[in-house]
Image: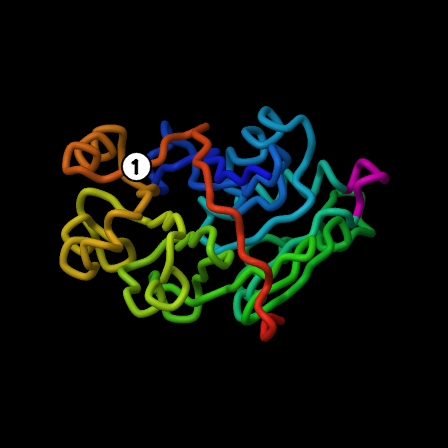
Amino acid sequence: MNWHLHFLGVGAAHAVELGSSAVVIERGDEPLLLIDCGPDTLDRYVAAYGTLPRALFITHTHMDHVAGLEQLFIRLWFDQRLRGSTKVFVHAGLLPWLQARAADYPGALAEGGVNFWEAFRLLPCTRGFWLDGLWFDVFATRHHVPGTSYGLALDASFVYTGDTRPIPETLARYAGGSEVIAHDCSLVGNPSHTGIDDIEREYPDALRSRLLLYHYGSAADGAALAARGYRIASANERIALPVPAKPRADAG
């Protein structure tokens, strides 16, 4: 069975021409899990698959990663067949921030009588979660404020960092084999995001050769990263993945 990462968008918050960074894990050419839902993500998802996502993982609550939740709420709530059908996996530590960002506005609908999360199936997690017989590891990243951002890994297949500074110890644990490593990186780093100088300082050659860079600041930044010998992801691109390992005995 074929596995892919399908990048719906690859841009940093200000790089609107590249699309909000979001990716779909595909199994056998079918969407399994959407990671993040920025302001343009849902339209891109529906254009690609003709349906709404049935499972979603939120890495963190900056608006370029969660602003599409309101649109998703509307589309789920007003189709009774779909109400409560989309699983939303989120680290338990993010729940207060996600509630404040997406769900606390008075009156989810002008008509009243609706709680925001009734449209979804909200599934808090900490170490990870099960989805369709697969165990996904959730791990903390280094973005903005400690404890507010998380990445995702599927054993022997991929690691997706979400927004982060370098995390060499974490990648040593979750990317010790041939996994594809989708990593936040732009041409110039800052206190919340990785730059190419950080990559070259923090990571060994063997790991750098497996990096797939996204969340860069412009098309020119992406071209410059590629010119330095790095693989970059592009919007609407599908990247083949190794077949995941069977879940570990200690998973869950």
The quarter of the picture where the C terminus appears is bottom right
Q: Please indicate, yes or no, whether residue 60 appears anywhere in the rendered image.
A: no
Q: Is residue 201 rendered magenta in the image?
A: no
The residue sitting at the bottom extreme is: 250
Disc 1 residue type (three-letter): Ile
| Location of mark 1 (residue) | 232
Who's the residue at 14% across and 37% down the image? 228
Give the answer, above or below, for where 141 lies relative to 180. below
Front one among 167 and 243: 243
Who's the residue at 71% across and 39% down the image? 74
**Residue 120 position in % (x across, y down):** 72, 51
**Residue 220 position in % (x across, y down):** 21, 29
| Rendered image quadrant of residue 3 | top right
Q: Is residue 80 rendered magenta in the image?
A: yes
Name the magenta segment's main secondary structure: loop
Q: How is the image coloured?
A: rainbow
Give the answer, above or below, for where 228 lies relative to 202. above
Front one among 141 and 202: 202
Magenta residues span 77-83
The quarter of the picture where the N terminus appears is top right
Give the answer, above or below, for where 223 lies relative to 21. above
Q: Say which element carries label 1.
A: strand
Q: Is 110 situated left or right of 224 in this image?
A: right
Q: Please indicate, yes or no, whether residue 238 appears anywhere in the rendered image.
A: yes
Q: Is 114 situated left or right of 57 in this image?
A: right
Q: Is 129 situated left or right of 236 in this image?
A: right
Who's the residue at 65% across and 54% down the image? 88
